[in-house]
Amino acid sequence: MKAKGKWDMAVKDRDRFSTATRIRLIGEQTAARVYRSQTKRQARRSRLTGRAALLALVVCTLVVALAYPIRQYVSQRAEVADLQRQRQQARERVEQLRDLKARWQDDAYAEQQIRQRLHYVLPGETGYVVIDPDLTKQSRADLGAADRPWYSNVWDGVDKSDASDQ
């Protein structure tokens, strides 16, 4: 038996130290490490994926929940800015009208405007209307409107605007 035992040990030692056996053992150890590593990575990935999915769900919920109020806020801010601009324009217009009213309170300004716009003259004065010779016939007919009563000019304007609409 001794001889047989030595022989078996010699075969085992030879197998243990052979290159093929060593490569096979290294391959098995490496495969075991890779398997353990992949298992750990998959476990980490599944945890990270679950966390990432939960985070994505929370973010999407916040975006959906806040989208409408933010849109309303932005549109209301634009509306407020527009109303402030309109208010400023109205204030400027009020100031212009106040200035105009103050000017019309002055008798000299009122007299000047009446003379200029309505071609009025004071008693004893002579009014002149200068006609430009380069004007067309139609323009000359319009200048003759100063010689007619004001209500005729108003009705002519209504008739002209009515004719242009058709």
Image (cartoon, grey):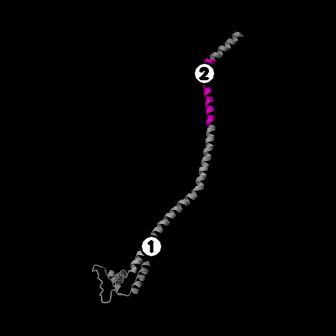
Q: Is residue 69 left or right of residue 149?
A: right
Task: Tell me what residue is drawn at x 42 percent, y 80 percent.
Answer: 161
The residue closer to the viewer here, 61 or 24, is 61
Q: Which residue is mark 1?
A: 94
**Which amino acid type is marked by label 2?**
Arg
Q: Is residue 134 left or right of residue 157?
A: left
The x, y position of residue 77, in whole percent, is 52, 61
Extreme right residue here?
Answer: 1
Instruction: Look at discs 2 and 1 and give the one toward the viewer.
Output: 1
The quadrant in which residue 48 appears is top right
> Disc 2 and disc 1: Cα gap in Å?
101 Å
- Badge 1 element: helix
Task: Tell me what residue is drawn at x 65 percent, y 15 percent.
Answer: 11
Q: Which residue is mark 2?
A: 22
| Residue 22 painted magenta | yes
Task: Tell me what residue is drawn at x 33 percent, y 80 percent.
Answer: 139
Question: Is 35 rendered above or below residue 99?
Answer: above
The x, y position of residue 136, in whole percent, is 31, 79
The residue range painted magenta reads 15-41
Q: Is residue 103 left or right of residue 78?
A: left
The x, y position of residue 164, in whole percent, is 42, 78
**Which amino acid type is marked by label 1?**
Val
